[in-house]
Amino acid sequence: MKHTETETRLSGQSPPEVPQVDITLTVNGISHSLQVDTRVTLLDALRDHLGLTGAKKGCDQGACGACTVMVDGKRVVSCLALAAQCQGREITTIEGLSTDGELHPMQAAFARHDAFQCGYCTPGQIMSAVCLIEEGRAETEEDIREFMSGNLCRCGAYPNIRAAIRDVAAAVRDVKGQS
């Protein structure tokens, strides 16, 4: 059996039109109306349609975590989510973590602990780490190692990444203990 696209090209017919969909994505608190191909991933919508290039395209298969963003407060590898599926949901990217020009505590901890080398994985690492703490899964070194295992760092900055996460997790525990 021949592939449909090849059949179409060989028969001289024009390829079938790819359906477009009108969507509204709320990213970092701002609504964006887009018309996209129904197959466009959230990662491609963020990068190519909205110019938010913090989430990186690493493996494009959901295995490296470089494209991690938050959707409704949960971590999502955006290369595997369709943009159209995210309509009506709150999307937060690395660009949306800082407030009034102040770094998010996790961003500051990554800088303080030198938790990056080339920096390519850093946005995904930070987004995943923020969620990890919000999920209450940063209690032990083993927890951090396990629940961050979906975020790869080719430079091997793992000890410093874990130190940054421990630092912020301890600060959050201190604040909760004082409440």
Image (cartoon, helix red, strand yellow):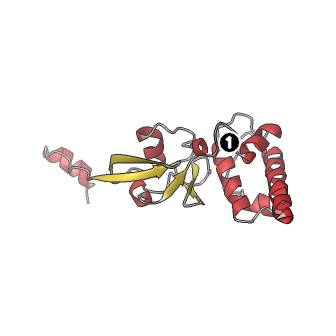
Residue 134 found in image quarter? bottom right
**Between 36 and 150, the one nearer to me in the picture:** 36
**Between 34 and 158, the one nearer to me in the picture:** 34
Q: What amino acid is at disc 1?
A: Thr
115 versus 83 height, above or below: above
Q: Residues within 10 Å of mark 1 (few under 14, many from 20)?
A: many
Rendered location of residue 112, percent (x, y): 82, 38
Q: How many marks?
A: 1
Rendered location of residue 6, percent (x, y): 25, 48
Which residue is denoted by mark 1 in the rendering? Answer: 122
Residue 156 seen by the camera: no
* Residue drawn where x is 53% and y is 38% of the image: 53
* Residue drawn where x is 47% and y is 60% of the image: 89
- Name the quarter where the C terminus is drawn: bottom right
Rendered location of residue 104, percent (x, y): 70, 45
Q: Secondary structure at mark 1?
A: helix
